[in-house]
Image (tube, helix red, strand yellow):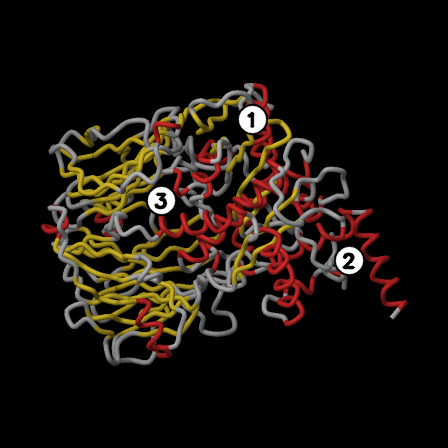
């Protein structure tokens, strides 16, 4: 036993002394055993960490109150019944509340919905179905075949994983179709080809999935035949991210496509002819498919195309392509330097585009005439965040939500030239008159102006304890939401923090899509440090402006944002006092070997390529974690069932923090998948735990001892 202890101590000392070398090879990584997702030893360690964190934080006087308040907000039956889709003359929505935590999928007539008095008919009670079948079902959506919308492909996930089960549902009968289409649990891609045929990519066993864990094959599956007889129409390479088939109804014509994704940001589109053969489309690989309208395929450019600038919407004639011609791309709309196209949707005759203009939302309606495309501004409240909720396939209605950090969401129906109609509004959950919100700009290291939003008490005097949230990756813009939903997947933590007299900040750092492709490209691969510099610049601007208290700054991010905050804490432990890291990527040496990690090489680089690892190793959180005085306390939250970002990332970071004698808190929920939390109970608990954590670490409100479980043993 003494030899074993001495050997373990030596490994720990070596790992602490040489942070880079210790984890650059699998043999030198003492915590590989924590990558065994459901390994007995790993789960025992997880339970120890969970218990220690609960013991430290649940006794805080604010915990019980915050959890109850969060649950009340999340389950409020006055929330908007959002229109998930419009099926002809009907609206379909998933409703979640205290009685139905997993949700009720239901439908109402469009007329009653527009009148503000929807007459709901339940289609599937997800909670009741789970109880009946002994499954912890999480709703993953439904694809209903237009224009009849009587048959739907329903996706249900066991516990919230990305993998799900597929079943065919009959809307008229209100039940699953006996002998209908079904697929077992897998990361499948399924779409209607026609009423009796599906486009299917799924896990068929060895060789059928890519290295990223997504389908590599696309088949046409006829109703009434075994899947083994489905016809193969397209296949990708093992190194691709994915292959999928999909279809779009455009007027009377259904267009079918196959999309091969060699990388996360490249796509090779083909049109499927009636006989199942493929016609390659002239859309640039790095463009983003948006929709089809009036026989025109519409895409967004992520790089210049001849003289057409990046960020523009362009179109190609599908009829011309199908006939063997090579139609030239037509420009639909090009945003200005301060703008970016974030969402695009089509109704029967109109194209709806949600723009960001210096991060503020704007909606435009595009119509096509003999002289080309015309742009029509939609009169919605300014300086707000907009989201396109749904559009109608028949008629030209678009549903859009408008909100701000201090303004609860309002759902509007927009129909052509008519004034937008407010359909429903969420009630105010707090007195907004006590707070002020403003947009500011920091100057990054290379001179780039970086926007950020800050909300704080109106009567604030002197610097405040401050929480800063950011993402900075994958073209995903971060737009300010009502404080009950801030930060993302930790709301209403943002509200609780500001109500306690503190400041909350949302930083729009590079890597996202706030200013279109250029904003993303500026932090891609070897340019990642720009995102980190942007965040540091925002923090230093807050301190210099007298807004943030220099020794009481917390930072927050999840997923890619988890990698962000890990790198930030390693680079500037003097600048930050607390870190919230949700479902993070941390071990960038091994990330491509863990679950869906291989699909993100286009964003980060390939650690198995020496040139790429040279820049990845400069910031990879796991490899750069060091024993430094005053390292910020870190709270990791995640899900055991996350089959996108491997839970081993956070587990190994927690173990290494302990080995280095650093303060770490940990919450691994057994369900919930990458979103962490399959119901509002866990979401409310997480918000309350994080509030107690911030109070303890940024304000010194320690009601009990900090978590101190036994350190995870090294291998």
- Whether 356 is drawn above or below 44: the answer is above
Coordinates of residue 288 in the picture (x, y in percent): 37, 44
The first of marks 2 and 3 along the sequence is: 2
- Specify whether 171 is left or right of 159: left
Query: Does dot 2 land on a helix, a strand or a loop?
Result: helix
* Residue, disc 1: 548
Query: Quadrant of the image for the C terminus?
Result: bottom right
Q: Position of residue 504 (x, y in %)?
A: 48, 33
Task: Name the element at disc 3.
Answer: loop
Q: Which mark is residue 283?
A: 3
Q: In which quarter of the image is residue 677?
A: bottom left
Q: Nearer the viewer, mark 3 or mark 1?
A: 1
Asked if marks 3 and 1 touch (Cβ < 8 Å), the reply is no
Q: Where is residue 310 in the image (x, y as percent from the top left)?
A: 40, 32
Image height of 553 relative to 116, above or below: above
Looking at the rendered structure, the secondary structure element under dot 1 is: strand
Q: Which residue is drawn at 73% across and 59% down?
A: 710
Mark 2, mark 3: which one is toward the viewer?
A: 2
Neighbours of disc 2 within 10 Å: few (<14), some (14-19), many (20+):
some
Considering only order in the chain, which callout, 1 or 3, is on the residue closer to the N terminus? 3
Residue 163: x %, y % from top left: 44, 65
| Residue 449 visible to an observer of this rendering | yes
Residue 28: numbered disc:
2
Look at discs 2 and 1 and give the one toward the viewer.
1
């Amino acid at each position: 036993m003494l030899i074993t202890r001495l050997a373990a101590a030596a490994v720990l000392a070596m790992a602490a002394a040489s942070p880079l070398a210790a984890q650059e090879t699998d043999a030198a990584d003492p915590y590989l055993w924590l990558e065994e997702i459901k390994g007995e030893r790993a789960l025992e360690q997880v339970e120890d960490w969970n218990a220690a964190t609960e013991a430290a934080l649940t006794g805080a006087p604010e915990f019980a109150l915050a959890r109850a308040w969060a649950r009340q907000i999340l389950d409020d039956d006055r929330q908007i019944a959002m229109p998930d889709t419009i099926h002809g003359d009907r609206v379909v929505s998933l409703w979640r509340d205290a009685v139905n935590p997993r949700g009720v999928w239901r439908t109402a007539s469009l007329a009653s919905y527009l009148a503000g008095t929807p007459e709901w008919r339940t289609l599937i009670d997800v909670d009741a179905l789970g109880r009946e079948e002994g499954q912890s079902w999480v709703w993953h959506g439904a694809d209903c075949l237009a224009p009849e919308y009587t048959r739907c492909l329903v996706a249900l996930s066991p516990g919230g994983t990305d993998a799900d089960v597929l079943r065919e549902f009959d809307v008229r009968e209100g039940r699953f179709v006996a002998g209908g289409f079904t697929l077992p649990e897998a990361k499948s891609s399924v779409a209607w080809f026609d009423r009796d045929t599906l486009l299917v990519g799924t896990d068929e066993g060895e060789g059928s999935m890519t290295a990223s864990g997504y389908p590599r094959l696309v088949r046409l599956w006829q109703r009434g035949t075994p899947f083994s007889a489905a016809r193969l129409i397209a296949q990708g390479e093992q190194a691709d991210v994915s292959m999928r088939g999909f279809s779009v109804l455009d007027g009377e014509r259904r267009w079918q496509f196959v999309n091969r994704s060699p990388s996360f940001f490249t796509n090779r589109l083909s049109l499927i002819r009636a006989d199942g053969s493929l016609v390659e489309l002239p859309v640039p690989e790095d463009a983003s498919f948006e929709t089809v309208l009036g026989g025109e395929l519409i895409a967004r450019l992520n790089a210049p195309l001849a003289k057409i600038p990046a960020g523009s919407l362009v179109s190609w004639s599908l009829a011309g392509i199908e006939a063997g011609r090579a139609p030239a791309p037509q420009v639909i709309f090009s945003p200005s330097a301060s703008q970016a196209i974030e969402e695009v949707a089509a109704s029967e005759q109109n194209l709806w585009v949600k723009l960001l203009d210096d991060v503020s939302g704007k909606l435009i309606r595009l119509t096509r005439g003999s002289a080309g495309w015309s742009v029509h501004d939609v009169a919605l409240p300014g300086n707000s965040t907009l989201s396109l909720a749904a559009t109608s396939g028949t008629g030209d209605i678009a549903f859009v939500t408008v909100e701000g950090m201090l303004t609860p969401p309002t759902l509007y129906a927009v129909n052509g030239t008519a004034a937008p109609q407010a359909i429903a509004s969420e009630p105010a959950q707090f007195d907004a008159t006590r707070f002020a919100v403003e947009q500011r700009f920091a100057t990054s290291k290379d001179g780039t102006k970086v926007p950020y939003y800050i909300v704080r008490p109106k009567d604030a005097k002197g610097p405040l304890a401050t929480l800063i949230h950011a993402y900075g990756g994958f073209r995903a813009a971060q737009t300010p939401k009502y404080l009950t939903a801030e930060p993302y997947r930790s709301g209403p933590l943002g509200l609780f923090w500001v109500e306690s007299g503190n400041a909350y900040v949302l930083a729009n750092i590079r890597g996202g899509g706030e200013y279109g492709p250029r904003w993303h490209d500026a932090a891609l691969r070897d340019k990642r440090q720009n995102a980190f510099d942007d965040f540091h610049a925002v923090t230093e601007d807050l301190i210099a402006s007298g807004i943030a208290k220099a020794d009481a700054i917390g930072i927050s991010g999840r997923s890619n944002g988890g990698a962000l905050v890990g790198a930030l804490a390693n680079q500037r432990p003097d600048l930050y006092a607390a870190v919230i890291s949700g479902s993070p990527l941390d071990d960038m040496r091994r990330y491509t070997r863990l679950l869906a990690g291989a699909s993100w090489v286009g964003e980060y680089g390939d650690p198995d390529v020496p040139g790429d690892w040279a820049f990845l190793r400069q910031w990879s959180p796991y490899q750069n974690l060091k024993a430094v005085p005053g390292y910020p306390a870190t709270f990791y939250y995640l899900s055991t069932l996350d089959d996108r970002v491997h839970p081993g990332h956070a587990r190994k970071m927690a173990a290494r923090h302990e080995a280095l004698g650093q303060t770490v808190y940990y919450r691994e929920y057994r369900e919930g998948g990458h979103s962490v939390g399959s119901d509002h109970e866990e979401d409310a608990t997480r918000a309350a735990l994080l509030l107690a954590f911030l109070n303890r670490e940024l304000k010194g409100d320690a009601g009990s001892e900090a978590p101190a479980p036994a350190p995870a043993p090294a291998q």
